[in-house]
Image: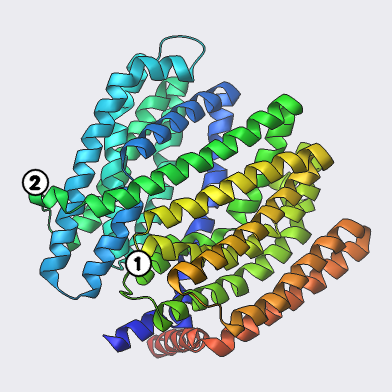
C-alpha cells in the first residue's frame, strides 16, 4: 500500500498524466476550432446563436439539478478504491449510480415542467416550449454520463477516460456536422440529443465493462449519500457564484462600453484561461482522486500537494511565455484581426495563470476533505475579488485594466487560499515551490514587460530567447525529478529494435 501511494505521488506519475490529459484537452480545442468553423459556415451567425442559447440553458438546468455528483462522487469512489476492498468499492459505485439516476429523472422532469418558462426566459421570439421538452432527455443523459465519469476517475481508470474523451470529441465532429449540413437549423435539437446519447453510451460501455451495473434505492443506501450531496451542492453553489460574477462583469461591460467590448473581453478571457490552462485539465481527473485517497492531514498530503504545484508551475511557465510572445500571431489565427485591441489585456491576464498554478492544487484540499463550507468560502472570496477588480480595472484603464484586475484577483486568491489552508488543513508550502516561484514568476513578468515595450525584430528575438530560457529551466528540472524521459527512450529503443529484427 505504501509503495503504491509513493508511486502515485511521484513526479513521473504527475508529469505523465498531466501530459496525457493536457494533450487530450489540446486535441479537444483543436477539433473544437475545426467544428466551430464548419458549423459557423453551415448555420451562420443566427444558427450559432440559437445553438448557444440551447446549450447554455441545458447547462443551467443540468448544473442546477445534478447536485454536483460528477465532482463530489469522485471522493467517495476514491476513498473506497484506496481500501482495496471490492465490496466497499461496489457499494460506493452502486450509491453513485442510484443517485445519478435520481438526478437524471429529476433534471428531465424539471426541464419538461419549466419548458414554457425556459422558452420565455431564453428567447424573445417564437414559442420554443416543444424544443425544451424534446431536449429534456439530454439533461438525464448528461447526469448519467457525469456519474459514470466520476466512477472512472475515482477508480483511477485514467487511460480509459482519455480514450473516452478523444472518442467524444471526434464523434461530436463526425455526428453533428452532417446533420447541420442536411437539415440546417432544424438539425440543432436532434444533433444535441444524438451527441448526448452517443457520449453517454460510450462512457457507460467502458464503465459497465469494469463494474457491473448495480443500483439500490433503499432508504438506508440513499441516506448514505448525504455527505456526497452536501459537498455537491456546495460545488453547484460555487458554480452559480462564478457564473454570476461572469454575468455581472459582462453586463457591466455591455452597459458601460459597447457590445463589441464584451466580445473582445470574452475572446481574451477564453484564450487566456482555457488555452493557456490546458496543464490544469489533469487536476480533476488524476490529482483530485489521489488527494481524496489520503485519509489524514499531514506530511503525505502536503507532499502530494507540493509535488502537484511544482509540476504544474514547471509545465505552465514556458507555455505562458510562449503564449504572450506568440499572441500577435495566435489571436488573428484563431479569431480575426478585429480582436487585436485585446492583446494588451491578454498579456497581463496571462500572469494570473502563474497564480492559478500555485493555488489550484491547494484549493482541492477542501474538496478532498469533504469540507463544503471551506470550499464555498474560498470560491466566494475569489468571485467577489474577480468581479470587483475587473470592473474597477475597466473603469480606470479600459480593456487593459481588466487584465490587471484578473492578475490582482489571482494574487488576492493566492494569499487567502494559503492562509486558509495553513489554518484549516495544516498545509505547509515547500521550499522547492518557493524557489521555483522566485525563478519562474519574474521570468513571466519580464516577458510581459518586453512584449509591451518592444516591437519589430527585437520583439521576436528577445521573446524567443525568454521562451528558450523558460523551457530550458523547466525541462532540466523535470528531467532531474523524474525518470519519464528514460522510460520514453527505452520504449523508442525497443520499438527500433523490434523493427530491425522484423527487417
Considering only vertical position in the picture, is 354 above or below 268?
A: below
Is 4 on the left or on the right of 355, as rendered? Answer: left
Q: Residues within 10 Å of mark 1 (few under 14, many from 20)?
A: many
- Image coordinates of residue 242 in percent, x first then y, are 52, 43
Q: First in sequence: mark 1 or mark 2?
A: 2
**Dividing the image into 4 quarters, which one contains the C terminus?**
bottom left
- Image coordinates of residue 29 in percent, x first then y, are 54, 51
Residue 375 circle label: none
The reply to whether discs 1 and 2 touch (Cβ–Cβ < 8 Å) is no
Viewer-closest of 214 and 488: 214
Is 419 on the left or on the right of 226, as rendered? Answer: right
Is 48 on the left or on the right of 400, as rendered? Answer: left
- Image coordinates of residue 193 in percent, x first then y, are 33, 32
Image quarter of residue 356: bottom right
Considering only vertical position in the picture, is 255 above or below 443?
A: above
Q: Residue furthest front?
A: 423
Residue 335 in view (yes/no) = no
Identify the element where label 2 is drawn: helix
List the residue tagged with mark 2: 219
Image quarter of residue 191: top left
Residue at 52 percent across and 48 percent down: it is 380
| Chosen colour scheme | rainbow
- Image coordinates of residue 388 in percent, x first then y, are 67, 42
Residue at 45 percent across and 28 percent down: it is 180
Residue at 86 percent across and 69 percent down: it is 462
Residue 289 circle label: 1
Amino acid at each position: 500500500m505504501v509503495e503504491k501511494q509513493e508511486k502515485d505521488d511521484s513526479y513521473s506519475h504527475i508529469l505523465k498524466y498531466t501530459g496525457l490529459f493536457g494533450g487530450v484537452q489540446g486535441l479537444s480545442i483543436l477539433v473544437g476550432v475545426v467544428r466551430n468553423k464548419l458549423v459557423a459556415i453551415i448555420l451562420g451567425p443566427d444558427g450559432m446563436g440559437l445553438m448557444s442559447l440551447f446549450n447554455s440553458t441545458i447547462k443551467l438546468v443540468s448544473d442546477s439539478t445534478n447536485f454536483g455528483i460528477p465532482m463530489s462522487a469522485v471522493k467517495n469512489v476514491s476513498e473506497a478504491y484506496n481500501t482495496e476492498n471490492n465490496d466497499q468499492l461496489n457499494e460506493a459505485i452502486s450509491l453513485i449510480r442510484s443517485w445519478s439516476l435520481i438526478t437524471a429523472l429529476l433534471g428531465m422532469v424539471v426541464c419538461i415542467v419549466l419548458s414554457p418558462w425556459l422558452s420565455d426566459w431564453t428567447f424573445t421570439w417564437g414559442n420554443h416550449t416543444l424544443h425544451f421538452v424534446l431536449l429534456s432527455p439530454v439533461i438525464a443523459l448528461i447526469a448519467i454520463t457525469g456519474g459514470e465519469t466520476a466512477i472512472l476517475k475515482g477508480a483511477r481508470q485514467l487511460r480509459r477516460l482519455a480514450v473516452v474523451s478523444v472518442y467524444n470529441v471526434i464523434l461530436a465532429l463526425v455526428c453533428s456536422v452532417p446533420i447541420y449540413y442536411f437539415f440546417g437549423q432544424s438539425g440543432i435539437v436532434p444533433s444535441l440529443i444524438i451527441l448526448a446519447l452517443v457520449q453517454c453510451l460510450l462512457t457507460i460501455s467502458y464503465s459497465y465493462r469494469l463494474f457491473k451495473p448495480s443500483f439500490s434505492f433503499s432508504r438506508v443506501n440513499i441516506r448514505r449519500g448525504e455527505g456526497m450531496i452536501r459537498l455537491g451542492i456546495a460545488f453547484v453553489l460555487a458554480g452559480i457564484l462564478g457564473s454570476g460574477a461572469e454575468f455581472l462583469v459582462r453586463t457591466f461591460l455591455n452597459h458601460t462600453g459597447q457590445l463589441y467590448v464584451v466580445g473582445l473581453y470574452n475572446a481574451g478571457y477564453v484564450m487566456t484561461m482555457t488555452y493557456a490552462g490546458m496543464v490544469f485539465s489533469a487536476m480533476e481527473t488524476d490529482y483530485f482522486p489521489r488527494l481524496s485517497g489520503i485519509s489524514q492531514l499531514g506530511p503525505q498530503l502536503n507532499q502530494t500537494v507540493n509535488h502537484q504545484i511544482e509540476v504544474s508551475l514547471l509545465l505552465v511557465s514556458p507555455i505562458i511565455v510562449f503564449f504572450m510572445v506568440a499572441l500577435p500571431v495566435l489571436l488573428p489565427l484563431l479569431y480575426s484581426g478585429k480582436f487585436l485591441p485585446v492583446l494588451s489585456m491578454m498579456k497581463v491576464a496571462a500572469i494570473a495563470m502563474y497564480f492559478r498554478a500555485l493555488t489550484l492544487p491547494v484549493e482541492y484540499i477542501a474538496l478532498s476533505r469533504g469540507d463544503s463550507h471551506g470550499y464555498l468560502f474560498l470560491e466566494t472570496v475569489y468571485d467577489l475579488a474577480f468581479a470587483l477588480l475587473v470592473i474597477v480595472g475597466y473603469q480606470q484603464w479600459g480593456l487593459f485594466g481588466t487584465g490587471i484586475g484578473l492578475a490582482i484577483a489571482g494574487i488576492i486568491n493566492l494569499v487567502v487560499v494559503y492562509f486558509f489552508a495553513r489554518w484549516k488543513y495544516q498545509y505547509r508550502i515547500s521550499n522547492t515551490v518557493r524557489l521555483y516561484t522566485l525563478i519562474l514568476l519574474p521570468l513571466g513578468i519580464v516577458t510581459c514587460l518586453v512584449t509591451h515595450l518592444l516591437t519589430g525584430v527585437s520583439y521576436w528575438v528577445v521573446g524567443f530567447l525568454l521562451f528558450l530560457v523558460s523551457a530550458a529551466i523547466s525541462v532540466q528540472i523535470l528531467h532531474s525529478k523524474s525518470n519519464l524521459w528514460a522510460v520514453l527512450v527505452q520504449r523508442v529503443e525497443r520499438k527500433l529494435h523490434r523493427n530491425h529484427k522484423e527487417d
